[in-house]
Image: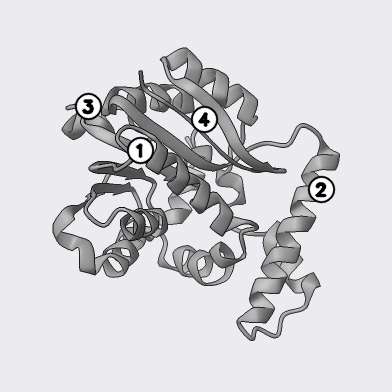
Amino acid sequence: MGKNPCEVWKTDSLVKTYLESVRGGIPFAAQQIEIMLRLAGAAGNGKPARFMDIGCGDGVLSASMLARFPEAKGVLVDFSEPMLVQARARLAGHASGLEFVTADYGQPAWHAPFEDGSFDLIVSGYSIHHQPDERKRSLYREIFNLLSPGGLFVNIEHVSSPSEWVERNFEELFVDSMYAFARSRGAEKSREQVSKEFYNRPDKDANILAPVELQCEWLRACGFRDVDCCFKVFELAVFGGRKP
């Protein structure tokens, strides 16, 4: 059996490259997070007490959550220790209310310590698309069970394009945004160089993209209500639903 391509996310080099050179260049990233926060404030009693961040990376979503809802408690889950190191550093000021968990949610037993169904909110950002489609569906069922009644799931995600033409337009947008980000940080890279790095990135083989419409159907099949895609620009989407 070949090596799991997702393992590259456990390397310090890729984590450093992503955090320093890629994430800040994601198009409309601030708007996607703002939609997540708006949904979080509209669900339940409007003030989530306990949340989970799945595939938390360096904790960017959790940091935004805590800035908006400072009294919330959170569980941050990732299988990449280099990412969790960054998350702990970013959120050091909130450490007393947070639990950092090294776990691979690609494995069905990952959620065993959290089966009390007490999460008001579960979020994920650009992570679940690394799982095979059948595992995505199973994970959505597990997330549903982890939520309390009225709880909300929000996925900020990389989804598939309906055609090669749309995919090319997305890629051009992403390269333009990454190039602008690099220039804003004083990097003397040409657009051609940024494009080459984008198309030859080491994590590309770890992507297993699925249409957002299909993933919304999977959420409905799990029992989620009010399922919707609330934001979409090409392959960037924010979608989710509520547990009745």
User: Of marks 2 and 3, which one's residue comes earlier in the chain?
Assistant: 3
Q: Is residue 230 above or below residue 169?
A: above
Q: Nearer the viewer, residue 33 or 111?
A: 33
From this viewpoint, is residue 196 visible? no
User: Which dot marks residue 122?
Assistant: 1
Residue that badge 3 annotates: 117
Label of residue 163 in the image: none
The residue under label 2 is: 168
Q: Residues within 10 Å of mark 1 (few under 14, many from 20)?
A: many
Q: Badge 2: how crowded within 10 Å, few (<14), some, or many (20+)?
A: few
The three-letter code of the residue at mark 4 reads: Pro
- Disc 2 residue type? Arg
| Cβ atoms at labels 4 and 2 below 8 Å apart | no
Q: Are marks 1 and 3 in contact (CB under 8 Å)?
A: no
Q: Position of residue 137 (x, y in %)?
A: 47, 22
Q: What residue would you read off at disc 4?
A: 132
